[in-house]
Amino acid sequence: MPDRLATPSDAGGPCVRDALRAAQAALARSSTPRLDAELLVAHVLGLSRPQVLARSSDPWPAEHAARLSELVARRADGEPVAYLVGRAWFHGLELEVTPDVLVPRPETEALVAWAGDWLRARPAAPHRPWRVIDVGTGSGAIALALADRVDAAEAEIWATDVSPAALAVARRNAARLGVGARVRLSVADLLPEGADAPAAFDVVVANLPYVGLRELGDVERDVVRWEPHGALFAGPDGLDIVRRLLAQLPSRLAPDGAAALEIGWRQGPAVRSLAAAAVPDAVVTVHPDLAGLDRMVVVQRCRA
Ligand SMILES: C[S@@+](CC[C@H](N)C(=O)[O-])C[C@H]1O[C@@H](n2cnc3c(N)ncnc32)[C@H](O)[C@@H]1O
């Protein structure tokens, strides 16, 4: 890889397109070299991707060459592009991400869709908005997408994370998206305790760590290398934290309430059994993702 991408060299000097091509070539081992190159060039220039493409014939500003080279080298070394640009997109929202939080994944949008559908199917809670909580919020992705999707009169939204550093990112995202006063964020081990916390929640959504230490060899090397281990791993079979959340549900999930948990593709049968044992008055269902792999377990409590 060249030391500096697109350094002015000849009469006309390079244009933005040249910088994009050089970055793309240097990122050939990425699964998305063109997209990565566009995101990095856009970040360095302080533009959006469409703006970069619209200005591809503009001269490439020489003062940005060293910075682009550094970012391209880090990306080529496997660092997630979201950490390099400090941003990720989830459910149409642009979120700040740092190495303190998991990069939100598109498959997790299924939890947002499920919670939105659950609320829409039950138009009005008796006498009060529904109480919804995102457990293990990380960047705030699920809670903030729900706040964006559901009216304040319809649902009150809580979110917790055990990591103060992750919660600081979620707080900044909530403030930037204008819902800082609406989403009640707190540092907590799973469901929040104390006088300010509701006795029970109507809806619990959780994308908690679920990778088993036994499966370490199956996880992409760059995920293990760059993303926070406290967001990934949960004991030998990956279910240590899910088990603890399921144990809280009998006392903290409302009588007609429901919980949805993201799971690993091999965990459907195990989590179904654990949930059925932990919440005997619930109907437990396992839902596939778009690839047909088990991805979510729903625990729907039924009033006797
Ligand atoms: C897989 S990440 C998911 C983050 C975010 N919900 C998302 O979907 O992008 C799991 C998150 O759960 C948090 N976490 C781990 N153990 C927890 C616990 N006992 N209580 C609350 N949060 C926890 C981690 O700090 C991490 O931010």
Image (cartoon, rainbow, N blue to C red):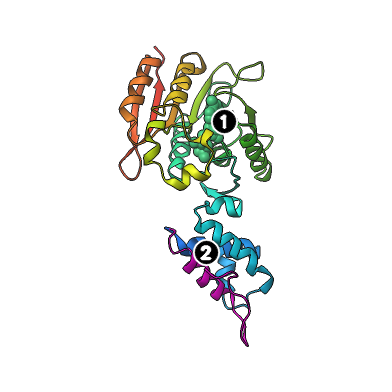
Cα separation between marks 2 and 1: 40 Å
Q: How dense is the environment of label 1, judged by Cα within 10 Å: few (below 14), some, or many (20 and up)? A: many
Residue drawn at x 52%, y 64% is 37
Q: Nearer the viewer, residue 87 or 145?
A: 87
Would residue 173 be seen by someone viewing this image from the given angle? Answer: yes
Residue drawn at x 50%, y 13% is 251
Q: Is the magenta stretch mostly helix, strand or loop?
A: loop
For marks 2 and 1, give the one nearer the viewer: 2
Q: Residue furthest top?
A: 304
Query: Where does residue 300 sit, x and y in percent of width and height?
Result: 40, 23
The amino acid type of the residue labelled 1 equals Ala
Magenta span includes 126: no
Magenta span includes 29: yes
Query: Where does residue 154 sit, x and y in percent of width and height?
Result: 56, 31
* Residue identifier under label 1: 155
Residue drawn at x 67%, y 45% is 176
Query: Where does residue 5 sit, x and y in percent of width and height?
Result: 58, 71
The quadrant of the image that shows the C terminus is top left
Q: How dense is the environment of label 2, judged by Cα within 10 Å: few (below 14), some, or many (20 and up)? A: many
Q: Do the residues labelled 2 and 1 touch (CB within 8 Å)?
A: no
Q: What stretch is highlighted in magenta?
A: 1-30
Q: Quadrant of residue 291?
A: top left
* Residue identifier under label 2: 37
Residue drawn at x 56%, y 64% is 49
